[in-house]
Amino acid sequence: MASDSESDSARYKRLAAEHAVDAIQSGMRVGLGSGSTAALVVRALARRLAEGRLTDVVGVPTSRATEELARALGVPLTTLDEQPVLELAIDGADEVDPWLGLIKGGGGALLREKIVAQASTRFIIVVDEAKLSPRLGTRWPVPVDVLPFGWRSQQRFLESLGARVSRREGPEGTPFLTDQGHFVLDCAWGPLEAPAALAERLAARAGLVEHGLFLGLASEVVVAGPRGVEVRRPG
């Protein structure tokens, strides 16, 4: 139920999350994404499990924060080592283009998020309509997960590709660290004319562990806005 203080954006995210959770069936192994929208998915799943509407569902969290939330809410968890193939994963995104290409990694969990997405038969993205964009990079930089060793070399490489690069900072100006202890370099290219070609360049560079371009992975995108909930699929 919506509260009087709930913002439109929060309400849209909640509606989209509830719609996506409808895809979960009893007995499924489900990837649980990271970030504020994915947290709504975890909460919706927990309610349905507590009410008995779903049974025997186990989740694979993509971050320590998601793991802690799921455990606190009583959602059973497993790992990809135990369950290497998942029927479904649900996650949010920072930016979505008309071809269902994504930028992810605003919370820094892009590596685990992509691993879980690629291990899943079906990958559902949940967003409010503010995340829609005509081209990736229009509204959000591309996060790049890098090893701390030699990170300035990676910064120079990314700048040579035309990006404005900033190392993500944590509390008190210390470097932000991913769950793997890596740095995140936020790379602003502006609207990307050829995101697939850029993804190939990034994937070929040693020391760049992963990038936030999620191309050809989304099975569907659940979008909520003033007109209600819409489901977009490739093609």
Image (cartoon, rainbow, N blue to C red):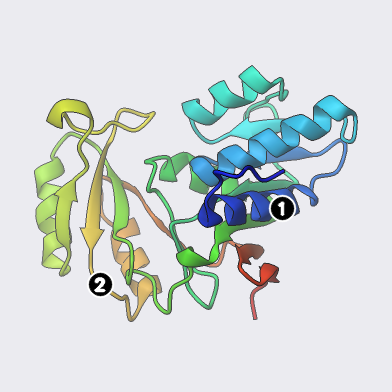
**Circles 2 and 1: CB atoms closer than 8 Å:** no
Q: Quadrant of the N terminus?
A: top right
Q: Quadrant of residue 162?
A: bottom left
| Badge 2 or badge 1: first in the primary sequence | 1
Residue 209 in percent (x, y) is at: 33, 45
Is residue 138 in view from this perspective? yes
- The residue nearer to you, when weighing 18 against 174, is 18
- The residue nearer to you, when weighing 167 against 154, is 167
Which residue is tagged 2? Answer: 190
Q: Quadrant of the C terminus?
A: bottom right
Name the amino acid type tagged 2.
Gly
User: How many badges with numbers are in the image?
Assistant: 2
Q: Is residue 211 left or right of residue 166?
A: right
Q: Residue at left 37%, top 41%? A: 108
The secondary element bearing badge 1 is classed as helix
Residue 82 in percent (x, y) is at: 68, 26
73 is higher (above) or lower (below) than 48: above
Residue 152 in percent (x, y) is at: 9, 45
Residue 134 in percent (x, y) is at: 43, 79
Q: Residue at left 80%, top 50%? A: 22
Q: How far apart are the two marked residues, 2 and 1, measured between alpha carbons? A: 30 Å
Is residue 84 in view from this perspective? no
The secondary element bearing badge 2 is classed as loop
Q: Is residue 207 left or right of residue 74?
A: left
Q: Residue at left 70%, top 55%? A: 122
15 is higher (above) or lower (below) than 71: below
Q: Quadrant of residue 168?
A: top left
37 is higher (above) or lower (below) than 202: above
Q: Can you tell which mark lies on residue 20?
A: 1
